[in-house]
């Protein structure tokens, strides 16, 4: 048997993506000796967790295999799902009770998963009122700055945005976003979010400049959207906002990844990290990017901090940062400060 056939990424894709489904991989996985099978499934679960797909992976795995040895992980996902639903219902209630007009963005709702946080997009004039309501209901602001405003407490972590701006460039304007909405349902909860075209336009710059990486969840959601959006309309909007060349560059990159994975049967590791050169080259494609205001010091600092997190993920140092709230908040504050100096705005 070719060892690469049972690579964790291939197993994960075979379970969560109908377009990739390889029944041979699933049959070979199930046929493994119990010890080898359990070890391989554990490795795949780690990959799924790093890619935002632990919830969905466990769901799909349960259909073909006894997963009772993942009792702790299953219970954790159930708790996270309960908190997510509780938070969604809370946000719906304050919107109704206090007449707040906001939408939920970056929910990646074409793939079942439990988000790590909930992103709220609201008019700048209503942001202060939203913050007050969150604080009145047991939420505490853990960071507030030009780039992001973050809350945690009685509900799931919640981030507030009023703009979609990276490196001083507004990629999707507020009026367009607030009028390009639709009613969706995710994990059984109704919510108001961007329509598919607006969701697609938010996601493209986000994967390059937001986190400078693309998880498998990001990729699969993007792939699903590409089948449904009005591509000509999206490209026209990007042209009007001065980032048509970047629009094309990202799509070409994603299509090449798709070709490598689904046609050439290559193993592409996810999260997929965009290197420094690709990000800098992407900036050069923006018509409205002001090179004079670009600060290499803060760009390198921001990039370095993220590289440290990627490099040391699943190590004792990473676990220390995750387990210590003070260290984690310090790390996030420095990263957010660097982004604010690069023209990130929320």
Image (cartoon, grey):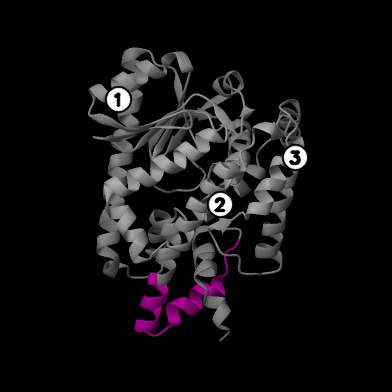
Residue 195: x %, y % from top left: 57, 30
- Magenta part of the chain: 20-42
Going from N to C along the chain, the mark reached first, 1 or 2, is: 1
| Magenta part, dominant SS | helix
To which residue does mark 1 refer? 134
Q: Are marks 3 and 1 in contact (CB under 8 Å)?
A: no
Foreground disc of the pair 2, 3: 3
Mark 2 element type? strand
Residue occupying image coordinates x 58% and y 30%:
165
C-alpha gap between disc 3 and disc 1: 39 Å
Q: Is residue 23 magenta?
A: yes
Q: Identify the mark at residue 213; answer none if there is no mark.
A: 2
The one of 220 and 300 positioned closer to us in this rendering: 300
Residue 30, quarter of picture: bottom left
The one of 161 and 47 positioned closer to us in this rendering: 161
The one of 244 and 279 positioned closer to us in this rendering: 279
Residue occupying image coordinates x 75% and y 43%:
248
Quadrant, the N terminus:
bottom right
Mark 1 element type? helix
Foreground disc of the pair 3, 1: 3
């Amino acid at each position: 048997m070719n060892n690469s056939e049972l690579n964790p990424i291939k197993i994960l894709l075979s379970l969560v993506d109908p377009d990739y489904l390889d029944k041979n991989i699933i049959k070979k996985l199930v046929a493994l000796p119990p010890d080898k099978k359990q070890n391989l499934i554990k490795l795949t679960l780690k990959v799924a967790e790093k890619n935002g797909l632990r919830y969905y992976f466990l769901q799909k795995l349960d259909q073909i295999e006894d997963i009772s040895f993942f009792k702790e992980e299953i219970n954790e996902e159930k708790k996270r799902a309960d908190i997510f639903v509780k938070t969604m219902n809370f946000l719906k209630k304050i919107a109704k009770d206090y007449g707040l007009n906001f939408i939920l963005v970056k929910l990646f709702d074409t793939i079942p998963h439990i988000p790590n946080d909930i992103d709220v997009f609201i008019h700048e004039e209503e942001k202060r009122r939203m913050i007050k309501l969150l604080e009145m209901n047991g939420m505490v602001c853990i960071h507030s700055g030009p780039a992001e405003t973050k809350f945690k407490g009685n509900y799931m972590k919640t981030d507030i945005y009023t703009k979609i701006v990276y490196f001083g460039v507004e990629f999707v304007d507020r009026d367009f976003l607030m009028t390009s909405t639709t009613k969706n349902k995710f994990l059984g909860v109704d919510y108001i979010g961007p329509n598919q075209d607006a969701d697609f336009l938010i996601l493209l710059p986000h994967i390059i400049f937001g986190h400078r990486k693309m998880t498998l969840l990001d990729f699969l959601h993007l792939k699903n959207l590409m089948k449904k959006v009005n591509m000509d309309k999206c490209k026209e909007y990007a042209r009007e906002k001065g980032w048509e060349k970047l629009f094309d560059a990202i799509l070409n990159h994603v299509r090449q990844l798709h070709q490598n994975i689904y046609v050439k049967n290559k193993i592409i590791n996810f999260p997929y990290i965009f290197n420094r050169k690709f990000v800098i080259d992407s900036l050069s494609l923006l018509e409205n990017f002001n090179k004079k205001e670009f600060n290499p010091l803060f760009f390198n600092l921001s990039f370095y901090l993220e590289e440290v997190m990627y490099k040391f993920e699943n190590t004792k140092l990473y676990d220390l940062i995750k387990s210590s709230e003070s260290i984690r908040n310090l790390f996030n504050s420095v990263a957010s400060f660097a982004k604010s100096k690069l023209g990130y705005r929320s």
